[in-house]
Image: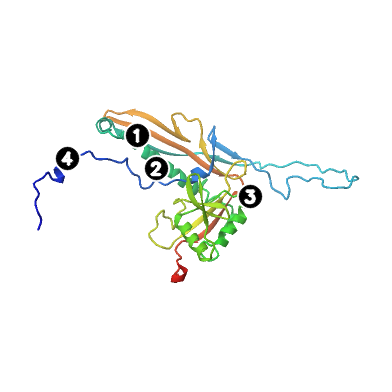
Amino acid sequence: MSEKYNALGREAAYQLADVTKTRPQFGAITPRWITKFLEFKGLDSGIYRVNKVVEGDTPLDVLCSQDPKDVKIPQGYIEYQTKPREYKLSSVSTILNVDTRIQDVYSSPYDQTNEQLVLAIESLRERQESQIINNDDYGLLKNVADNQRIQTRYGAPMPDDLDELLAKVWKEPSFFLAHPRAIAAFEREATRRGVPPVTANINGGNFILWRGVPIIPTDKLLVDGLKSPKSKSGKTNILLVRSGENKRGVIGLYQSGLQNEHSRGLSVRFRGVDDNGLASYLLSLYCSAAILADDAIAVLEDVEVGDYYEYTRSEV
């Protein structure tokens, strides 16, 4: 039997209470580790030309002899490609509208315009990371050379498969890229074989390593075309990248020296207030990516993420 107390109730008291509020929480925001691990280069004109030498067994014939009588030194030159690839920056843009009356009245404790801009910029940065991997023109997945593509041995990502990737990108590999589900699948396979990966703190995050190379998570390497697949099974890809211009690796590109620059490659322009009191902002992000040498990137294709195992109690 409930008892009625002669005291102020919760609902009435709530009307006088201060409520502690958070900033708007955007569930789609990710750490975007790719943009933290990948080297970026600013462009002056929005175009990046990758000049390459026409490859042979050696760039130039040379003399290598201990015979003092052999003084005929080879002559020649190093040929360049006459039609090198040029990368042009693409733009990711949006227009943000803010009602100035809402801004005037409801901007305590958080500034409404600033919070709207923060969320819009986060959305653009998420799209940038997706484009670096999946863009039809410059995306990493589409531009991996045919001889740098390998298939899994048995579907699930096994230590041998990642070793094959390392054999493809053996010149100073920087990091693996994989969907979190693919990383979990690899951890299961490695643990089952008695070689669980170690972890390390790099760039402020904890990552597992394979052969000393960090495996970086991203949901932009889709599983069956989805960021968050509902099914336990599914296929995805794992990338191995060498980053850096000096290493003839993979680099991100952006436009430097923008007017109204907010951050790397991103401008925020105030477009004015219309007759209805709507303030308008144009957000433009300029980005691309370039692979400087074929052996700077390799991909493990058709990676199955849904293989699980039953363990006996003694194995747990």
User: Does the residue at mark 4 contact the one at mark 1 (Cβ under 8 Å)?
Assistant: no
For marks 2 and 1, give the CA distance: 14 Å
Q: Nearer the viewer, residue 252 or 208?
A: 208
For marks 4 and 1, give the CA distance: 28 Å
Q: Nearer the viewer, residue 26 or 57?
A: 26
The residue wearing badge 2 is 123
Label 1 SS: helix
Of badges 4 and 1, nearer the viewer stands 4
The residue wearing badge 4 is 15
Residue type highlighted by circle 1: Asn
Residue type highlighted by circle 4: Gln
Which tag, 2 or 1, sits closer to the chain's start? 1
- Is 57 placed left or right of 283 in the picture? right
- Is 32 placed left or right of 120 in the picture? right
For marks 4 and 2, give the CA distance: 36 Å
Q: Which residue appears at 71% of the width and 42% of the height?
A: 79
The residue wearing badge 1 is 114
For marks 3 and 1, give the CA distance: 44 Å
Which tag, 2 or 3, sits closer to the chain's start? 2
Residue type highlighted by circle 2: Ser
The residue wearing badge 3 is 171
Of badges 4 and 2, nearer the viewer stands 4
Which tag, 3 or 1, sits closer to the chain's start? 1
For marks 2 and 3, give the CA distance: 34 Å
Of badges 4 and 3, nearer the viewer stands 4
